Amino acid sequence: MQKRYLLMVGVAILAIFSFGLVIAGESGESMCIPMGTIVIEPPDQIASKRAAVMFPHATHFSYTCGTCHHKWDRETPVLSCMATDCHDIATIPKKVEGNKADPELSSRYYKAAYHSACIGCHKEIKQQNKAIENSYRSVMTPVQSSGPTGCIDCHPKE
């Protein structure tokens, strides 16, 4: 029994150490991961119509960093989503042919990017939960929290 306990503790320590190396990347420097709530606001030049989003970063640690930080190279610090060449367009792109905006420009529009990533993921989880609940697996499979999908769920009234 004691050998089994020591083995489990050893494996846990090894796993924790390995996780630290993965986070640090190949550069050998430690990576700083925000643990609390991150305030997400529009760019400075935009007058906000809704309250800032209080994003619970630690709640999303079960996902890989690349799920949201799709341009991160795992070595340099993560840049803001509104950094150059990511989601750096502050105003909604103008519609052109066929009454649609250029898809590339639309994906770079900061508001569309956040709403697509956050709400899209939360809706996908809701669909998975509904499928689980409608099957026999609901007895054995716990459903995960889906997260907010409505405006005031993320943007509380001020």
Image: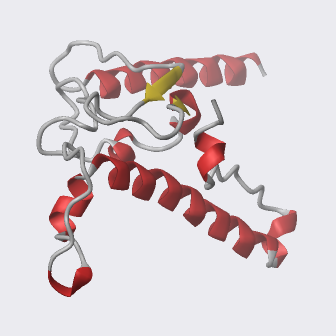
Vertical comparison of 140 with 79: above or below: below
Q: Residue furthest top?
A: 29
Q: Residue furthest bottom?
A: 98
Q: Is residue 18 left or right of residue 12?
A: left
Instruction: Identify which residue, 142 or 156, lies in the foreground.
Output: 156
| Position in image of residue 26 (x %, y %) | 17, 25
Q: Is residue 149 left or right of residue 112?
A: right
Q: Is residue 142 left or right of residue 102?
A: right
Q: Name which residue lies at 19% across and 65% down.
A: 94
Q: Name which residue lies at 24% across and 49% down.
A: 91
Vertical comparison of 146 with 100: above or below: above
Vertical comparison of 7 with 92: above or below: above
| Position in image of residue 122 (x %, y %) | 57, 56
| Position in image of residue 37 (x %, y %) | 53, 23
Q: Name which residue lies at 24% across and 44% down.
A: 90
Q: Is residue 72 left or right of residue 14?
A: left
| Position in image of residue 70 (x %, y %) | 27, 47
Which part of the image, by quadrant, shows the C terminus?
A: top right
Instruction: Identify which residue, 113 or 30, lies in the foreground.
Output: 113
Q: How many marks?
A: 0
Query: Residue 24, located in which quarter of the rendered image?
Result: top left
Vertical comparison of 116 with 14: above or below: below
Q: Name which residue lies at 39% across and 20% down.
A: 33
Q: Residue furthest left?
A: 85
Protein image colouring: secondary structure
Query: Residue 155, located in which quarter of the rendered image?
Result: top right
Which part of the image, by quadrant, shows the N terminus?
A: top right
Query: Residue 92, located in which quarter of the rendered image?
Result: bottom left
Q: Residue furthest right?
A: 139
